[in-house]
Amino acid sequence: MGRIKDIRPLKWTGESLLLLDQRKLPLKEEWIECRDYECVARAIENMVVRGAPAIGVVAAYGVVLGAKEVAEKAKSYVDFKAKVELIINRLAATRPTAVNLFWALKRMRRIVEAGKSIEDIVAALETEAVNIERQDVETNRKIGFFGAELLSSREVILTHCNTGALATAGYGTALGVIRAAVEMGKEVTVFVDETRPYLQGARLTAWELQEEGIPYYLITDNMAGYFMSLGEITCVIVGADRIARNGDTANKIGTYSLSVLAKEHGIPFYIAAPTSTFDLSIRSGSEIPIEERSEEEVLYCHCKDCRIAPYGAKVKNPAFDVTPHENITGIITEKGVINAPNEEKIVEFFKEA
Ligand code: MRU
């Protein structure tokens, strides 16, 4: 249909990493330039960039910037390797839940450990980061294709958080499925959960859909059940931050409630995620570390002059929850769909993949 735009949250210049500041969207489109790895680490911590695949890609470029910084002063390969390891550890400490971060850093560490000359390693790290970025977009297009194939010619899709181009290197996962369905000529309307407290749905997903001209309604999170009960939602598609070996899936807080509501109303509930989001080293969702974010995200409505709770209010702010695999109709990956996922099917899927 030719209306899908090429939104990208990052640009690698060869010397620095440009990041679209997602804290400012949708009102301002401002870019931040990172010239060192610490800037990249802070950008991840402070949500300049967010979304599981995007964090992985950006961290990989952080390693490149860090390796370039230490290469000049390194006394030997051993010295260089030790310093890059500290940089990798710093980047790994930014956010705990999305496994794509650790997956990307593992790829970068492997290059350093391959041990050629420092100059060659720095060049190989840059090539690897560029590959991780490029492969992510290709992967998302495949997820989009497999996901869109599951949909009928007319769908009303509920989605949560932001899983679009902004959350990845481009195109998106769950939002990639929606993009692909539109590209296939399917008639799609999207219900976008605002996604309290950080409002990724209201600020980012709504912005992306508007840019594309894909019809959507923005709803508050507590409206989802009502629209399901009216029969207005035909399917739910969300992303993932980490999927355990049995299919239990960590994703943005509120995803679990949606899965329960979808089950109650007999609505298909899909996870769209690359295979890099699977953590086969853990057996179930109870082992997934859940990030606790600052109280301020709950106490204020995305700006400092808009406090919404009394002073002294105690807050809990888990950024993610875990959806049990029993609530998931299927996991859409770049290698195909795992229907009614469980440990046996996932292990078999990875053996074949
Ligand atoms: O806290 P965020 O904004 O990084 O959380 C993002 C999500 O939970 C997404 O749903 C997930 O990372 C998948 S993005 C393709």
Image (cartoon, helix red, strand yellow):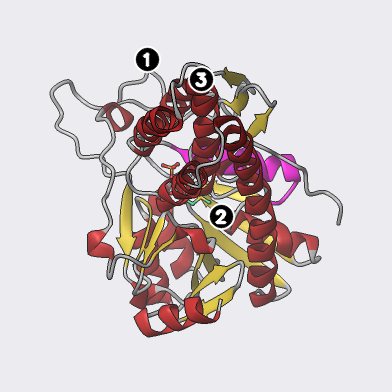
Q: CA distance from mark 2 to mark 1?
A: 29 Å
Q: Quadrant of residue 301?
A: top left
Task: Say which amino acid is labelled 1.
Answer: Asp
Kindly identify which numbered label has been placed on residue 191: 2
Task: Say which amino acid is labelled 3.
Answer: Glu
In the displayed structure, does residue 202 sit left or right of residue 45?
Answer: right
Give the residue number, with chain letter if any, for mark 1.
305
Q: Comparing marks 3 and 2, which lies closer to the viewer?
A: 3
Q: CA distance from mark 3 to mark 1?
A: 39 Å
Picture coordinates of residue 17 (x, y %)?
Answer: 61, 26
Quadrant of image for the N terminus: bottom right
Earlier-in-chain disc, 3 versus 2 = 3
Circle 3 sits in a helix, a strand or a loop, which is it?
Answer: helix
Kindly identify which numbered label has been placed on residue 69: 3
In the displayed structure, does residue 147 sit left or right of residue 186?
Answer: left
- The foreground one among 279 and 265 is 279
Picture layout, residue 69 above or below residue 245: above
Earlier-in-chain disc, 3 versus 1 = 3
